Amino acid sequence: MTVGTLLAFVVTVLLITLSGGAGEEIAGISSPGPFTSYGVTVSRVLAEIAAVVTIGSLLLAAFLVPPQRSGTLAADGYAAIRTAAVSSWCWGATSIAAALFAAADGAGVPVTELFQPRAFLQYVGAIDQPKAWLITAVVAFVIAVACHFVLSWGWTTALFFLAVAGLFPVGATGHSSSGGSHDLATNSLLIHLVAAALWVGGLIALIALGRRRGPGLPLAARRFSRIALACWVAMAVSGVINALVRVSPADLVSTQYGLLILAKITALAMLGVLGQQQRSRSLRALTERGSKGAFLQLAGVETLIMFMTLGIAGALSATEPPAATTVPSTTELLIGYQLDGPPTVARLLFDWRFDLIYGSLAILLAVVYVAGVRRLRRRGDAWPIGRTAAWLLGCATILISTSSGIGRYSPAMFSVHMGNHMLLSMVAPVLLVLGGSVTLALRALPPAGRNDPPGPREWVLAFVHSPISRALTQPLVAGALFVGSFYLLYFSGLFGAALNYHWAHLAMNGHFLLTGYVFFWPLIGVDPAPRPLQPLGRLGLMFASMPFHAFFGVILMGSQTIIGGSFYRSLGLPWVDSLLSEQRLGGGIAWASGEIPALVVLVVLMVQWARADERQARRIDRKADADSDADLAAYNEMLRRMAEERR
């Protein structure tokens, strides 16, 4: 069996496993025919094969092989970009086919009926999955066109992240996005999809590099080994969580399905340890000998680990879970879980439901930051304790706002959602920018040598000085994104339309965090901003934004139109007597909670301004001591000459 045949088989098995459920018959909907039923699975698998090849090729070009010193892609990166161009065209075409087949299957009609424009718009517009495939097709075609023009490392990195984002629309609208516990199921599926695409796609790109005998193969193999280990952990954990969604903790030891989950968790752990040991041996052989045999050994180890992981995942998906004993309530169907009562202080603080996306992100950011501080201190360098405290408090704010009772009640009540909004957009970003994470990374990460390829430290510098960072931190752009998004989201109908979708809640939380960070970074950030502002400019930006934020809360308190009323009425929470009063409470929270962070920002600005003046005075004093007040002597000499001229 050739390497290409083996990889094709691996990818097909993987993506059929990930696609499980496509083409299932739904009660009450007529069969669309065998051609359409098989076309659902075939088109989806082909689209996902093209997706992982695109993502893997862009991963190789962006992070696995080094560019030239000028930032232009080297030969290995350019070859990977050409591969990504072809595969992304295929990704877009097969995504359109998947949209057609999914719409026909959901409507119970043959796919040929959708070739008419009116029928196409009718069926595709009525079902979420075909619309998600069309969005994916647009993303794929944008990448395909851009790959023909991109030659720099920076834009290749942007295309890589865009390609990863292209997995989200379909993953967020599949079978996991409905029913009870769909929040955990969707989050774990998204993590699973991204990890699988990076692992499989990266392995395909690495083997293609090995067949070309590219000079960057040893470095690419070392970097991919670390990525593969992280992807295995993410796939294993997310797969187990997705299985545990179907059982209660008591079922783990009292049912056959639960015992199988425990056995497969043990098998996955043993597989991870064995795989890491084999990777280390293969990498040492590749580094020492650099032979094709050593590379094939590494590729074979990765392929074997992938097969075994997929076998365990497939067995989990094929095992019948215990039958549900209760029918999900309306609240469970709409937000994914049941609420136990009104949001008392105790429930908001202690009624936790861990958010797999943002809760994991908060913990990961805290762990990486602490690891950087420890590296500095082991080296004998100091790091201000205040910055560490600010960063950890910012991470704790993200964790609490998304995983505590605040995050639990946020999708169901407007007032709690507004509190969550203020925490993510006003409190967490202020604390994070005071943590100085970029400065810490530049001090903790080792710089690449003169002839060494760029590494993580150089990547951080490139991101800070990238055109995207410079555009987003431009004062007018940052202010418009931060303040304008309040009005656009809540007064345009977007918020009401987004309430029905879990992916929209994820997107809103990410938007709140990013716009807040982009706004406060040049304002009070410890890290040097791409567009630094003078103290007066910072004060002006802050004072210009404060009235708009206050007006937003006042408008909400005085509005007679209920935002998202249809969704909140369908929930029918017994402790919410009046949706209008609930909305006015949310407006009051927005108005009141925004004032405290604004005051903190003003105090920080004043302190930073005073410290900047002190540093400037000390620099002047040191210069005067060094040159014996040469500037003052020159100034006095100028005054003396002017006086003589007047005489």
Image (tube, rainbow, N blue to C red):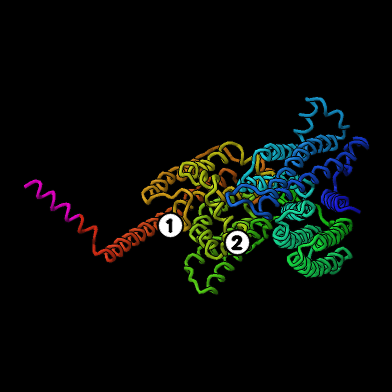
Q: Which residues are magenta?
A: 635-647
Work out whether 610 lies above or below 32: below
In the image, is 102 to the left or to the right of 337?
Answer: right
Tell me, yes or no, if residue 484 can be seen here: yes
Label 1: few (<14), some or many (≥20) within 10 Å? few
**Occupied quadrant, residue 524:** bottom left
> Where is the N terminus found, in terms of image quarters?
bottom right
In the rendering, at what x and y percent does residue 626 appear? 29, 65
Tell me the element at label 1: helix
Residue at position x 78%, y 57% from top? 242
Give the camera-side residue of 28 and 599.
599
- According to the image, label 2 marks what residue? 365
**Which amino acid does the dot numbered 2 rest on?**
Leu
Placement of 266 over or under 534, stated as above or below: below
Front position among marks 2 and 1: 2
326 inside magenta stretch: no
Q: Position of residue 231 (x, y in %)?
A: 74, 59
Residue at image mark 1: 600
Of callouts 2 and 1, the N-terminal one: 2
Name which residue lies at 84% across and 36% down.
101
Which amino acid type corresponds to the residue marked 1 in the rendered image? Val
